[in-house]
Amino acid sequence: MQQPDTASRRSPLAWLDSTFQYWALAPAVLLFAVLTLYPVANLLRMSVSTIDFAKGEFVWTFAGAKNLLTLADDWLFRIALRNTLSFVAAAVVLEMVLGFLLALVASQVTAGSGVYRTILVIPILVPAVAIGCMWKLMYNYEFGIINQILTALRLPGQAWLADVNMAMPAVILVDVWHWVPFVFLILLAGLESLPVEVLEAASVDGANGWQRLWHVIMPLVWPTFSVALMFRTIFAFKVFDEVFLLTSGGPGTSTEVVSLYIYQVFFSENRMGYGALLSIVTIAIISLFVIVYRRTGRSEV
Amino acid sequence: MLSRQRLLTALCLLAIVVMLVPACGGTPTPAPTATTAPKPAEPTKAPVAPTAVPTQAPLPTLPPTQAPSKVLGPPTKDVFLDVGKQVPFTFLINSSPWYAGFEAVVKLYEKQTGNTVNLEVSPYAGMLEKARNSVRGKESPFDIVNLDTQNTVEFYSGGFLMPIKEIDPNFKLDPAVSTYDDCLYWNEKTQWRDKDGILYGLPVQGNLNVYYYRADLFEKAGLKVPETWDEMVAAAEKLGKSPDIYGMVVRGEKGNGIRFDFMSYMLGVGGSIEKDAAHGDFTVTINSPQVKKALDFYVSLAKKYGPPNSGAISQNDMVQLMSTGKAVQLNMVTAAWPNMDDPSKSQVVGKVNVSVIPRPADGVFATPIGNWVAGIPKNVPPERQKAALAFMKWYLTYEAQYRFVEAGGIPPVRTDVYDSDLAQKPANRWMAAYKKSLPYAKQVLGYKEGAQVEAILGLRLNQALIGELSTGKALNLAAEEIYKVFKDNGRKTDMLPKLPE
């Protein structure tokens, strides 16, 4: 009696079984391709084109390296990039330090923790436009509350948003106020998830507060810290709302940042091809940050 | 001694206060004189040197205000214009200070005709993108898009709008309707907005810059209303001595703000950005000696008589300064007028008046136009195009424009409304100045590179104002950058010799 061909009967099923993980991922990958890869590919196409309109239709013209040559000559983009990097460095460092200190303090205060933790996150709940309007009023030279307090203390009022040396620090202050609660939340979660036994063991071994912080807490919380740092760096690099609402990039070029410049080129000046190239350059820079952070974020305790 | 727990609790409470204080808004109310930030002490300086007394032909003077030969009265018709039954349509409109007047006449239209108008109200920021997205799509959700005049060239040249006469071949623009330096037309051959072109737009509102001044202070000091820069400076000197009021305020905010504000100074000296763009000559003339003279004057006004934050003053700040009594004089859009006599917003009700923007002693009167134009997109079904045009025909009648002003709409787009009894009301005392300013009003940047040129000027002028660059260097850099823009776009262009820096 001939044995049934079980291998061939099982092979389609076996094949399906062995490739199931790919089929399961396929919808997510497809969605990713449509929502991410396709727009980026389109952006790449735009970056080597000039796009005009005639008779109500788009007119795409291949521009080759013309947009790249424009970028090479674009002194304002270089200033915007420099300002953005300065903004990122200052704002992120302040936010991480303040957020971490706040989280450290909050993790050790038990009375009323629910209430104060809720109140402390209010700044990230306020819409960015409202924050911009609110701070613009506060910075107002004539009627702003900051200058009114200074005047009451017999100090001169400042032109916070009109002085080239003060405008960027003023914007950074707003960003710090807005995003410290975000860092606080992430780091507080990280601190509260630390194993208590390790901290107790350190205390038993005679470590003082500083030693516990530096040699035990910091290494343990570093993965959480680096996630918060990565998020904040990416978001800070894309800063737009505060600058647009407070200073529009002025006075002069003192608060010109990359996102605002791209908005100006792409939307105000309607130079879509060049705007697309600027967007790609920005994506590349941020991607570099992410790669660097992911490598430095890997540490073993 | 405080326990560790208590110390940490105190720190937490401090952090809460720091987070919450700004979140409470700190909304200021106009502070009484004693607590506002004091004007910084200025060393005694000579006033701005008066311009040379000319010896050539008689200088332009403003015509005296004359009563019209016939004062037109309020509407008497029940229905201003019979437009017939129309399908509902949607109007994309901006929520500007004059919106209340516009909304009122729309409701009147609906009541009179039984037709429906859906208003899509948008803040200024975002209007352009909404309009762009609508005309570039398969079918526009908006049947009329309201366009800032500086954006009309993009829509005309891009072929997005329906020529008015293709919707109604018998349409004729009433001669009383202002065309605002012919910005309603587009000439495809010359790539310019001129009357030989096709009519694509219809005016919705006709903003011009006018000169606002504290009439009560002028009268008290025995000063006449300035017609020249010298008289303006004399007023600033005399009336701006108090630390609580600025002799002159400029709109120095980077970008459109300073660019628009500076135009009356530039045009007043006979200056221009390009030599003759209307006829294809894009030779860059922004760095001419005349324009430098205008910019030197503008910067000196801000430095000597303005607030320390002149480089960040926006239109809203100008309105605030004038309506709270902190400015003697400034140039501002006519549409800001309602803020001056509104008791809920103004501390100087009845004390402000407007006039034509003063000119240089050896120059001309000039003011930039910042009007709004309605366009009907091509990608809209014909019946909605007809409905949209029917509304605009009704809107452009004398009666509708009369009601527009009555309801707070400023300024109307028909010149005969300025000859009506509305002009005799104290609340409409701005009308005489507006009517006088119309002949001197000019459109600028009427070409597709307009937005790029504005961005360049908006930056360089601001840098000159805040002292980052000298006026000569700022204008030279602006000229180089504008020249490059024109050259890259294949324009016939050249440059003037550099100014001394």
Image: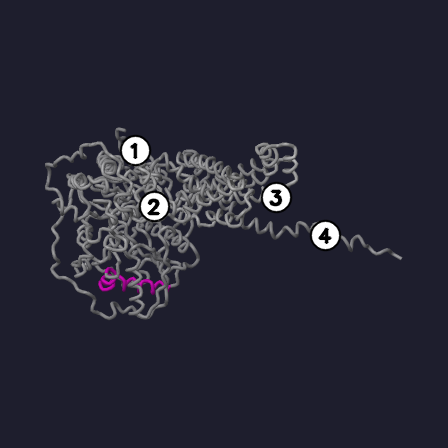
Confirm or deny contact between disc 2 and disc 4 (CB under 8 A). no
Residue shown at 86% from the left, 55% from the top: A3
Looking at the image, can residue A115 be seen?
A: yes
Residue toward you, A97 or B31: B31
| First-in-chain label (3 vs 4) | 4
Main SS, magenta region, reads: helix
Q: Amino acid at mark 4?
A: Asp
Q: Which residue is mark 1?
A: B467
Q: Amino acid at mark 3?
A: Ser
User: Do the dots labelled 1 and 4 sit on one chain?
Assistant: no
Q: Which residue is mark 3?
A: A193
Q: Mark 3, mark 2: which one is toward the viewer?
A: 3
Q: For the magenta stretch, what is the residue range? A: B382-405
Checking the image for residue B425, the label placed there is none
Secondary-structure class at tag 3:
loop
Confirm or deny contact between disc 3 and disc 2 (CB under 8 A). no
Q: Dividing the picture into quarters, in which one does residue B497 lie?
A: top left
Taking the magenta stretch, the answer to whether it contains residue B400 is: yes
Q: Mark 2, mark 1: which one is toward the viewer?
A: 1
Q: Disc 2 versus disc 1: distance between alpha carbons?
A: 31 Å
Q: Mark 1, mark 3: which one is toward the viewer?
A: 3
Q: Which residue is mark 2?
A: B448
Q: Dividing the picture into quarters, in which one does residue B301 lie?
A: top left
Q: Which residue is mark 4?
A: A17
Residue toward you, A75 or B299: B299
Q: Mark 1, mark 4: which one is toward the viewer?
A: 1
Residue shown at 40% from the left, 37% from the top: A169
> Which chain does the numbered disc 4 sit on?
A
| Crowding near the residue tagged with mark 3, few <14, some 14–19, many ≥20 C-alpha atoms within 10 Å | few
> Which chain does the numbered disc 2 sit on?
B
